[in-house]
Image: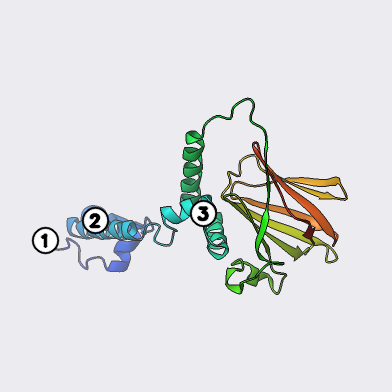
Amino acid sequence: MNCVSPPELDDGQLVSYVDGEADDPVAAHITECPYCRENAHRLARWQNRLRARLYRLTCPSSMELGDYHLGLLVPAQTMTVAQHLRECPHCTREVAQLRDFLRALAPEPGPLEQMKVIIARLVGGRGADWQPGLAPAFAGLRGEQEEPYIYQADHAQIVIEVQDDTEQPNLKVVLGLVTGLDAQGLTVQLWQAGQRLTTTAVDEAGNFVIPHLAPGRYDLTLNGPEVEIRFPTLEV
């Protein structure tokens, strides 16, 4: 079979047709020419096979996403996966499905069960045996900053960074990431001298931000429907 109206379409014209970007003459030629139409279909099939091979090639594996949700990754991996989740709807949906599945398996709390209170342990970063390789992946993008605090509370891991407030240079902002704990319904409360200063919600990805803080010492609690995590005094 040959092109019915030579010259036959070249690869660039065929690609433009397959991608839906062909001009009117190319589209009309494809309609009239079985030979070029078959070449276009062959190219489309090849592109579909290639997309199938490359689909989510750069995404973390399901096992790594599960370990992220359970708080089992080291801090550097945790921050890398967290950044990926901010940009990838496929992995975000997979983590949400895993969270819903685990929630469905959990038994309903009994009427006499009380709020579980956990004291977070400082296990890395500022004030602990710091290993530079465990620094959050995004820290370098913000210039030289203080090392983060890395806490463990049962299966949950919480990374807290203190940064300069870009809107008010004399103040600070606290950035946090919670993993290994269902973020739904979680809030963070900031206290000073026994008085609660602010309450902020933790988003679905486990992030929270507390801006415009004067340098000083603060107490922090992470509060959920069934658990309260209390942190050692935070130096801001």
Residue named by callout 3: 68
In space, the residues marked 2 and 3 are separated at their CA atoms by 41 Å
Left or right for 187, reference 87: right
Residue 179 numbered mark, or none: none
Whether 35 is drawn above or below 111: the answer is below
Based on the displayed image, in which of its 4 quarters is residue 137 positioned?
Answer: bottom right
Please name which of the two marks, 2 or 3, marks the residue nearer to the observer.
3
Circles 1 and 2 in contact, beta carbons < 8 Å? no
Question: Which secondary structure lies at badge 1?
Answer: loop
Disc 2 crowd rating (10 Å Cα; few below 14, some 14-19, many 20+) is some
Q: Nearer the viewer, mark 1 or mark 2?
A: 2
Query: Between 194 and 89, which is closer to the camera in this rendering?
Result: 194
Q: Which residue is mark 1?
A: 1
Q: Residue at x 68, y 70 (%)?
A: 142
Q: Quadrant of the C terminus?
A: bottom right
Q: Is there CB contact under 8 Å for labels 2 and 3?
A: no
Pick whichever of labels 2 and 3 is earlier in the sequence: 2
Residue picked out by circle 2? 41
The residue most toward the top is 111
Q: CA distance from mark 1 to mark 2?
A: 15 Å
Residue 133 is situated, as x and y percent measured from the top left of the image, at 57, 72
**Considering the numbered disc 2 on the image, is that residue within a helix, a strand or a loop?**
helix
Q: Looking at the picture, how far across and down is residue 139, in whole percent?
A: 65, 68
